């Protein structure tokens, strides 16, 4: 019999499929803010609409609270200067995060740029310091908010514009404070350091008392044109964990008087933790006259430690 035929040759292997292109960065959730910022107008579902929040004081570090879920500690937000925010509301407007590169470049080198600033989320808060150019117009200028959701901080396509704008304003300069005094048991040196730390405009420093009964700190206010004190703002410590901040400030009160430590007129308090944890606490000072030149922050209770980040008097 004839020999069997050889098997047919195997077909060549199919070429391997090309590797899948990397997935583009996914946009993080939209950005919304809670107190101390207030919403200014509501946004519809139109693409050209923006939620607007105000106001952030210019030139000082300000702690903003994020509203809603979706952000974790370590996430990055960008606040990019827009000379005329009205153009963003036009149907054909370019809505992107142009300017992010300049801000990142400056931030990585420890520089301040009028193009905007960036902040890192921590405990559902972000600290910003807005230093706009000389052309800033409070009636038109704003900051568009972008979130980072990629792998390259220098690539502007990895930043996503949100439907939020932050408005800023120049606030009247805070009144100068001098001649600090603290409750019994605090040295003159510690007292001076306390006042220096709570008036330096920095979010990572804070004044701290010793553990005492009803600890307080008081300072003399330099009134302008003999106008009485109108309001006092106390910013809680943001460097420590919220549990410590709560222990240091829950239930504090603000008073004014004619001498250090005098409780002549109460401006506000005791303040609940639900209010303190949202950021700076501002209270008006009613029924005050120009003779009340001392402001006092007191923390009622036994074995209490008073600590906070900043105080401003207007």
Image (cartoon, rainbow, N blue to C red):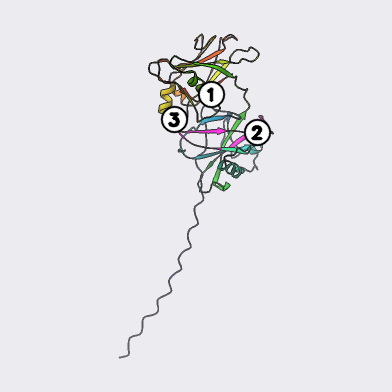
For marks 3 and 1, give the one nearer the viewer. Answer: 1
User: In the displayed image of the protein, which residue is found farthest to the left?
Assistant: 1
Residue under numbered circle 1: 196
x then y, percent, for residue 253: 47, 16
x then y, percent, for residue 19: 47, 60
Residue under numbered circle 2: 141
Q: Residue at x 38, y 18 (%)?
A: 303
For marks 2 and 1, give the one nearer the viewer. Answer: 1
Alpha carbon separation for disc pair 2 and 3: 34 Å
Q: Quadrant of the N terminus?
A: bottom left
- The vertical placement of 162 against 23, above or below, is above
x then y, percent, for residue 226: 63, 12
In the image, the segment drawn in magenta is 118-145
Q: Which of 194 and 72 lies nearest the eye of the viewer? A: 194
Q: Which of 25 and 152 lies nearest the eye of the viewer? A: 152
Q: Is residue 217 left or right of residue 6?
A: right
Residue under numbered circle 3: 240
Alpha carbon separation for disc pair 3 and 1: 19 Å
Q: Quadrant of residue 213?
A: top left
Magenta stretch holds residue 113? no
């Amino acid at each position: 019999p004839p020999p069997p035929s050889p098997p047919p040759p195997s077909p060549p292997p199919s070429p391997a499929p090309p590797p899948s292109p990397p997935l583009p960065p996914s946009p993080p959730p939209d950005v919304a803010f809670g107190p101390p910022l207030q919403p200014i107008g509501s946004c519809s579902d139109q693409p050209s609409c923006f939620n607007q929040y105000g106001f952030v004081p210019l030139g000082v570090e300000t702690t903003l609270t994020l509203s809603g879920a979706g952000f974790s500690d370590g996430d990055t937000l960008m606040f990019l200067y827009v000379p005329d925010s009205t153009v963003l509301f036009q149907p054909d407007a370019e809505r992107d995060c142009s300017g992010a590169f300049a801000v990142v470049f400056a931030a990585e080198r420890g520089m301040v740029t009028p193009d905007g600033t960036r902040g890192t989320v921590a405990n559902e808060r972000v600290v910003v310091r807005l230093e706009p150019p000389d052309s800033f117009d409070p009636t038109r200028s704003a900051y568009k908010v972008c979130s980072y959701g990629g792998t390259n901080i220098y690539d502007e396509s990895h930043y996503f514009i949100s439907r939020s704008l932050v408005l800023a304003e120049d606030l009247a300069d805070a009144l100068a404070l001098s001649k600090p005094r603290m409750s019994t048991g605090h040295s003159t040196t510690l007292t001076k350091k306390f006042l220096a730390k709570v008036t330096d405009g920095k979010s990572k420093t804070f004044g701290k008392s010793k553990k005492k009964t009803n600890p307080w700190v008081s300072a003399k206010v330099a009134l302008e044109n003999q106008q009485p004190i109108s309001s006092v703002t106390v910013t809680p410590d943001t460097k420590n964990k919220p549990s410590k901040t709560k222990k240091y400030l829950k239930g504090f009160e603000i008073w004014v008087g004619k001498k250090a430590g005098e409780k002549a007129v109460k401006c506000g308090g005791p303040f609940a933790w639900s209010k303190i944890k949202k950021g700076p606490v501002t209270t008006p000072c009613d029924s005050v006259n120009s003779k009340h030149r001392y402001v006092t922050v007191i923390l009622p209770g036994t074995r209490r430690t008073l600590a906070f980040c900043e105080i401003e008097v207007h």
